[in-house]
Amino acid sequence: MGIKTALPKTELYLYTAVLSLALLWAGSWIIETSSENVNRKAFRENVKPGWHYFGRKMDVSDFEWVMWFTTFRNHILFALSGHVIFAKICSMLSPKNRSLIYMLYGSLAVLITMGWTYLTLILSHCVILYSVALVKRKWLCFVAGLTSLATFKMEPFNTWQEGFATGSFDLQDILFYGGCGFSIMRCMSFALENCEKKDGNYSFLDLIKYNFYLPFFFFGPVMTFDRFHEQVSPANNPNLTRKEREMWNITIHALVHLGAILVVDVFFHFLYILTIPNDLKLLKQLSDWSLAGLAYSNLVYDWVKSAVLFGVINTVSRLDHLDPPQPPKCITMLYVFAETHFDRGINDWLCKYVYDYIGENHDAIFKELLATICTFAVTTLWLGPCELVYIWSFFNCFGLNFELWVAKLFSLPPFSTIERNLMSEAMSRRIRGLFNAVNFWQIVLYNVLALNSLDFAQLVTKRLLLKGFPLSTLSVLFVTYCGVQLIKERERKQALLDDPEPVQRVSLS
């Protein structure tokens, strides 16, 4: 079946109507549940007074969102604004040395925020990994890098190193582990790229300029060293000229992110989607549709949060003439594990150095199995080894491989023969959509346990697959199938724009 296969417009209109009504229905139940239970004892800790002109309380369960846009909003804005102003002035005076200027400002900001002992700790890891990079052995770079990363993820090493951060403030733990973790990933990227360098080595100054670029330092995203080095090189755009309408696009992106922040804040006054999953007694009273809506909305919110947080940072980096990693693909547009991620930078890093390197073209079953196991082993270490992360990694690793197994199975006779000879392309698209709908809910359930809790994921699974069977199960799958077909239609239209079908000329002779 080709990606350009079309379905009748009336069928697509039906899918749109079904999906819209289902989302409104589930959303209304969540709003009703939020309103009726706002004064529950279990809600007191995470539901606080919000914007007074709404007259409603606000869900403040997500510390990261509250930190960025409420508690430490002014501090973060001050640091990023200072970077933009300082970098702009100095870049105008000396555009060839802009990467050095970014590094000096970033190092100074880290020094003032976290203290000289923390800066010394980061530099010591940079020195160690730079020394290993000079050997130009990839396996040794991986061993050294992952060992360094493990010292920040496992006891007693992480507690000992945490003592290097002086002072005491609410944001310290986030900045400490964020800065250290991303620094190690950047140092590993530098070391692996140095192994690929044919003549000589990159300098230690190149590593420091790469690591201490402030917008990426504490919160990411990770841009691989080869891309960063190329983009800040004086040979690349020495006069720092911009493409046509580039500033307009940057402004539009900034306004979109600002709008998204306001919309999420408004939604948090009406939809307590992060607090409700923590109250198991209340969850057991909700309908199957409400639970399905909660699970889905939690993944959508996490995508929105990732897109906004990285979007703010990316806007700053675009002002510095960089092309940062793109925001993650919307969870609503996903129905395959191969495209599922919430951090495009880490995803690109893992694909470049682990997944694609081992799996190559991803056609061989055993190579793919080895590639996914290694990828999720590194991901587990990055997230921090614990029971919940182990479960999440196992199921996502299984899902990625299961996709390949099913694809391989159906590419063999008699399945391939039946699809090719007995089915129309439209029918083939419909049948594939059914499998994709099942896959979509695997993605939701496998990831919601990491975003909320294992108990919530288990409850949703039991209600949708066991207690709710067959009515709830089939109705949720049908709505999901409608959504998948609308996604496929969007992909079809994009494919036609990217690769228009040639117009057939009618001969008059």
Image (spheres, rainbow, N blue to C red):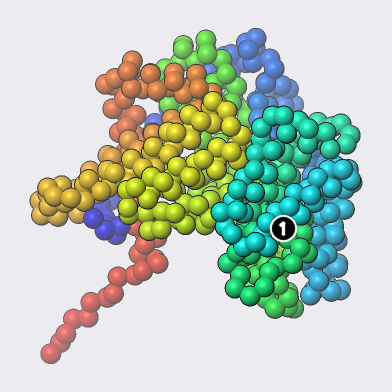
Q: What residue do we see at 73% from left, 33% from top?
A: 157
Name, please, the residue furthest toward the left. Answer: 422
Q: Is residue 204 above or below residue 509?
A: above
Res 264 seen here: yes
Q: Which residue is mark 1?
A: 131
User: As drawn, is 181 to the left or to the right of 328?
Assistant: right
Q: Quadrant of the N terminus?
A: bottom left
Q: Indicate the position of residue 301 as horizontal and vertical percent values.
A: 56, 36
Which of the 4 quarters of the picture holds residue 317? bottom right
Res 18 seen here: no
Residue type at mark 1 is: Ser
Instruction: Judge by depth and name the residue closer to the eye, 207 or 238.
Output: 207
Q: Is residue 287 above or below residue 95?
A: above
Q: What residue do we see at 68% from left, 27% from top?
A: 60
Mark 1 element type:
helix
User: As drawn, is 450 to the left or to the right of 215?
Assistant: left
User: As drawn, is 421 to the left or to the right of 504?
Assistant: left
Q: What residue do we see at 65% from left, 26% from top?
A: 61
Q: Indicate the position of residue 159 as horizontal and vertical percent values.
A: 76, 30
Name, please, the residue furthest toward the bottom. Answer: 509
Instruction: Judge by depth and name the residue closer to the eye, 220 or 166.
Output: 166
Q: Quadrant of the C terminus?
A: bottom left
User: As drawn, is 439 to the left or to the right of 343?
Assistant: left
Q: Indicate the position of residue 70 as horizontal and vertical percent values.
A: 76, 35
Q: Residues within 10 Å of mark 1 (few under 14, many from 20)?
A: some
Q: What residue do we see at 32% from left, 52% from top?
A: 364
